[in-house]
Image (cartoon, rainbow, N blue to C red):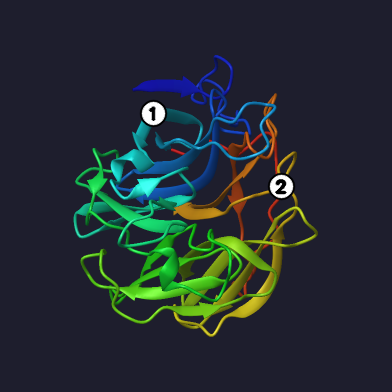
Amino acid sequence: MKIFILLALFSSLACPGLRAQNPIIRDVFTADPAPLVYRDTLFLYTGHDTASVQETNYKMPDWRIYSTTDMVHWKDYGKRLSPKTFAWATGDAYAAQCVYHKGRFYWFVATFHKKDEHSQGGAAIGVAVADRPTGPFKDAIGKALIVNEMTTDKPHAWDDIDPTVFVDDDQQIYLYWGNGSCKWVRLKDNMTELASPITTFTPKNYIEGPWVYKRKKLYYLVYASAGTKPEMIEYCTAPSAAGPWTYRGIIQGNVPNSFTTHPGIVDYKGKSYFFYHNGALPTGGSYRRSICVDELQYNPDGTIKPIVQTTKGVKPVK
């Protein structure tokens, strides 16, 4: 484990006006941020881009974990999970999210399935489980939770990616995912079995990367969208986790030097934060991305104010 400081050699305690930089992780290329607050710590689960400057496709061998207690100093736990953890998997480590439920941590991941008696290949969603937020994680069920053959509304083999999980106030669990269309299903309390048929719908301009959460009495579905191409972030709201979803608009415009962006939203120590990725680091790009975070603010009616992308990042919190 190592601790890296994101602002030269200064401490936010010595300089209380100091902020973190964006991107927040600068020693490796990271993507697809998924924040989780557990006790007094914010954990950040990420993808890991390792493609060379010349390569024109993703190369993502593993998932990583970071944590902070002040939004400025981040602890690096390194690689904590990879597709090799799953005997049925092959290929890259696409977007993933870890959630806490009844004493355990469930890391829902997107990767690709080997051709075997369970699937003929294509994107798939698996679940890893651990007793601590940093692991060690193991395959929770020894097979994929979602395989390509379970969703047939899109012809391409990578439509079952980017899982996000939401646990409602009544403890009903929902899994959302999808490229090209958004799919959702209820999960059983064990987090590893489906409890309903899969429902497919397509919010306006939807591409991929859904993130679902609840604030007060309103449910939010935030996602990477077609926007003006490259991707932007748009969102919908609903009176329940099952919808119906009402389109609300664009909250984040294009990001520097990356075709994709990806949302992760969390409340921490009295503030709301919006995580995303761009290609702003030196030698960065669409296949060498870096995670950023800015404050997220709401209007009185619950709609989200447009995200202001900054290079200074957020102020430290205690």
Q: Nearer the viewer, residue 167 or 72?
A: 167
Instruction: Identify whether 261 is placed above or below 54.
Output: below
Q: CA distance from mark 1 to mark 2?
A: 26 Å
Give amino acid for label 1.
Answer: Gly
Looking at the image, residue 26 sits to the left or right of residue 256; the answer is: left
Q: Amino acid at mark 2?
A: Phe
In this figure, what is the number of numbered marks? Answer: 2
- Say which of 246 and 111 sits in front: 111
Q: Is residue 147 left or right of residue 142?
A: right
Quadrant in which residue 194 is drawn: bottom left
Q: Position of residue 217 (x, y in %)?
A: 46, 78
Q: Position of residue 154 (x, y in %)?
A: 57, 71
Element on which disc 1 rests: strand
Write the residue at 40% across / 43% down.
42
Q: Which residue is mark 2?
A: 259
Q: Residues within 10 Å of mark 1 (few under 14, many from 20)?
A: some
Residue 232 lies, with reference to residue 176, above or below; the image says above
Splitting the image into 4 quarters, where does residue 180 fall?
A: bottom right
> Which residue occupies the extreme right position in the image?
228
Residue 242 % position (x, y): 45, 81
Q: Earlier in the sequence, mark 1 or mark 2?
A: 1
Q: Nearer the viewer, mark 1 or mark 2?
A: 2
**234 lies above or below 75:** below
Q: How many other residues sit within 10 Å of disc 2, few (<14), some (14-19) or many (≥20)?
A: some
Name which quarter of the figure residue 250 lies in.
bottom right
Instruction: State the residue in front, 119 or 224.
Output: 119
Quadrant location of the N terminus in the rendered image: top left
Quarter occupied by the C terminus: top left
Secondary structure at badge 2 equals loop
Question: Image check: 209 left or right of 40?
Answer: right
Please name the residue that numbered disc 1 is placed on: 78
